[in-house]
Amino acid sequence: MTALLILGGTAEARDLATCAVERYGAANVLTSLAGRTAAPLLPAGRVRIGGFGGAEGLAAFVAANGVRGVVDATHPFARQIAANARAACAATKCPHIRLERPPWQPGPGDDWRPFADAAAAAEALAQLSPTRVFLALGSGGLAPFAPLTRHRFLVRVVDPAAGPPPLPNYAVVTARPPFAIAAEAALLAEHNIDIVVCKASGGAGGAAKLAAARARGIPVWLIDRPPLPAGAATVPTVAAALAWLAGLTRISPADTVELS
Ligand code: NAP
């Protein structure tokens, strides 16, 4: 049994786990991680790692463990698990909400250009003369940039890459968010970056590169978020997720929980 299942992998999920553990006790709060990084930052409470086996597998997990509420606090670009969570909770009639941080908003001095997806950004880059691009997309989703032989790319990954990125000319740095503005500015200067390409992830952890780009006077190309599953109930903050949880009277610190 477990009372609250948090689908994690974000700073918000960790913050929520900390608050939920204070309220409900560590035994009642289980965070699930996909297992993408070798040494993930672990949240408070209980943790499980690895996929569930699609929406059906997640539904079976929810039912088998008597889960009483699910907060999907995964990354704004993690749409498969979001869809799975919605479907699994509908099938099991388990209360469910998505915690998704608001997108960044441009301010004075920002030169931002939106793109529907990475392929569209790669197409636009193909029109430019040779340039130096900070491809801040993580280790996945780089394939659309593979044909761009004239540009020089800087790629940042959390784990040392299992293999080289699928790019013709690149440098790789290994680092984990959050990032400081001064460090981001130094990185852009060191690699003489002309354009930053990143996901419209939102959140404080990745915002420093935007400030550094503004200070350097270079554009930021933002990949739009994929659409949410239709009808997904969403809250934008940890506080709002906690308020939603407070309405779930079936979760209380007195719950006896044992993960089956
Ligand atoms: P995704 O495409 O939405 O999910 C792919 C599959 O990974 C899911 O079907 C599920 O496998 C498994 N999975 C994803 N999140 C999981 C979780 N929290 N617990 C257990 N299984 C999970 O996800 P993604 O974009 O690859 O992201 C993977 C994880 O990294 C997410 O937890 C997300 O919060 C985190 N993250 C993603 C990004 C990003 O840019 N996408 C950035 C930072 C952090 P099964 O079908 O087998 O259950």
Image (cartoon, grey):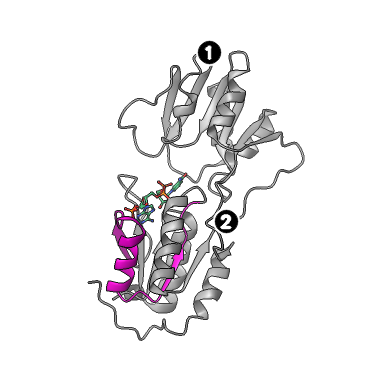
Query: In the drawing, does residue 34 fall left or right of residue 124?
Result: left
Give the class, few, some or many, for how many residues have Cα within 10 Å of label 1's Cα (few <14, many ≥20). some
Query: In the drawing, does residue 181 fall left or right of residue 142?
Result: right
Q: Amino acid at mark 2?
A: Arg
How far from the left and from the top, in percent, is residue 248?
Answer: 48, 80
Above or below, 27 relative to 55: below
Q: Toward the viewer: 8 or 53?
A: 53
Q: Toward the viewer: 35 or 40?
A: 35
- The mark found on residue 150 in the picture is 1
Query: Which range of residues does the magenta coloring cover?
Result: 46-75
The residue positioned 44% from the left and 28% from the top of the image is: 143
The N terminus - image quarter: bottom left
Above or below, 216 relative to 222: above
Question: Considering the numbered disc 1 on the image, is that residue within a helix, a strand or a loop?
Answer: loop
How far from the left and from the top, in percent, is residue 132?
Answer: 56, 20
Cβ at disc 2 under 8 Å from ligand 1: no
The residue positioned 46% from the left and 50% from the top of the image is: 78
| Magenta-colored stretch includes residue 83 | no
Q: Earlier in the sequence, mark 1 or mark 2?
A: 2
The residue positioned 51% from the left and 79% from the top of the image is: 246
Q: Is residue 186 visible?
A: no
The C terminus - image quarter: bottom left
| Magenta-colored stretch includes residue 58 | yes
Query: In the drawing, does residue 202 fall left or right of residue 5?
Result: right
Residue projecting furthest to the right: 108
Q: Which residue is mark 2?
A: 101
Q: Amino acid at mark 1?
A: Arg
How far from the left and from the top, in percent, is residue 108?
Answer: 77, 40
- The mark found on residue 197 in the picture is none
How far from the left and from the top, in percent, is residue 77?
Answer: 50, 47
CA distance separating discs 1 and 2: 36 Å
